Amino acid sequence: MKARLQAIAQQAQVCSCGNKHYSIDMDTIEIGAGALKQAAVYIAEQSWTHVVMIADAHTYLAAGNNLADELKQRNVACHVVMLKPDDNGDVLANEVAIVQALLEVPLHTDAILAVGSGTIHDITRFVSYKMGKPFVSVPTAPSVDGFNSMGAPLIIRGFKTTYQLHCPVALFADMEVLGKAPAPMRAAGFGDMIGKYTSLLDWTFSHRMADEPYCPLSAEMTREALESCVVHAEDIAAGNDEGIRILIEALIISGLAMLIFGHSHPASGGEHHISHSWEMIFLKEGRKQILHGAKVGVAAPLIAERYKQDLVPYLNGSRAWPEGADKGLQEKLIANKEELLEAVLSLPEPARFKELLAQVGGPTEPQDLGLEEAHVAHSMKEAHLIRMNRYTILHFLNVQGL
Ligand SMILES: [Zn+2]
């Protein structure tokens, strides 16, 4: 992965999109068998003598205790912050977990290790950033694409908000650890990637319609990562070495695409806002949470369907522009109609999304997640309000009443 990192950094330097590109402030990304040991070697090489590991009971068993042993052998003191689950058995990236971590991480620590999946990374990213400490990423499942980006979606007062913080200084993905991750976590990682079909479309749309910045390099990296997952869906479903490697690499590349661009545009659009909205509904109702990628996967075909049904008629002129809707936006839509039409029509059919999700054993319907029709209808109408500063087709359709 080192050569790939350098290649991406070089491409970012010569990318002519005119946006600021962020440098990849990471020493290394290691993917392979034995990466846990490499993590310990790296940590010892930094001359860090005291580190803190943030984990939960599951991820500690999956990787934490082995890493702690490796560190001990190298005379690195490792203090473990074991995050406590809530009454539903969930560890959430919320105030409770953040305060627990802030209370338990000693001030003199040299670095913090995130040992877990997305939630533990978001907590660690926040705490390490606020404490001014570097953090090291040790994913325990290929379940999400946020390990090596700067953004941390946190739930504060029941509301999901994404904060731009910092990326890990190094990432160590041990294939032996990832290979033992439960199959639904793999399916969730695949679901998070399938969501890039609609997030990339939303990005093109927001660039043309709302002048949001766009980087073709970052978009291309994300699309390639998405396509590699689709091509290897069978291997990912089987959970063989090839499949797990393709999936974790895709998730990491998606993270790097966000990292060089500095925002989550390539990886998060309307489908993510729907997923966030469902998460908030579950919180309000005190229900057990569902994996982020599982929700994104189910949301993606719903969003694709809405976009095909309700945007295409305004692009091909088969539906009249309503009286009260913004005329300036109509002009912009017409000016960009060829590009936008092609982008919407090239989205896979909703049935194809579901076929892919089912192939890897993931949920496909809102009911599979325990959602009722009223929840889905509510989210389709209101999810864009979660992130008003991010333009999407969903935002456009809802605000214009289309
Ligand atoms: Zn995601």
Image (tube, grey):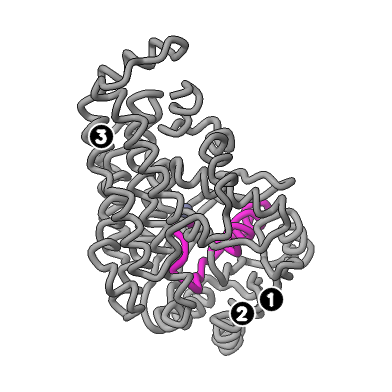
User: Is there CB contact under 8 Å for labels 2 and 1?
Assistant: yes
- At horizontal 32% and vertical 80% (from top left) the residue drawn is 241
The residue that appears at 27% across and 44% down in the rendered structure is 347
Does the beta carbon at disc 3 come under 8 Å from ligand 1?
no
What amino acid type should be assigned to the residue bearing mark 1? Val
Instruction: Tell me, for residue 16, which label it has, or none.
Output: 3
- CA gap between label 3 and label 1 equals 45 Å
The image position of residue 194, as x and y in percent, is 36, 55
User: Which residue is the site of mark 2?
Assistant: 60
Identify residue type, mark 3: Ser
4, 55: nearer the viewer: 55
Q: Helix or strand or loop: what does disc 1 sit on?
A: strand
Residue at the front extreme, as displayed = 373
Q: Nearer the viewer, residue 81 or 349?
A: 349
* Of pointers 2 and 1, the one earlier in the residue sequence: 2
Q: CA distance from mark 3 to mark 2?
A: 44 Å
User: Which residue occupies 51% across, 62% down?
Assistant: 368
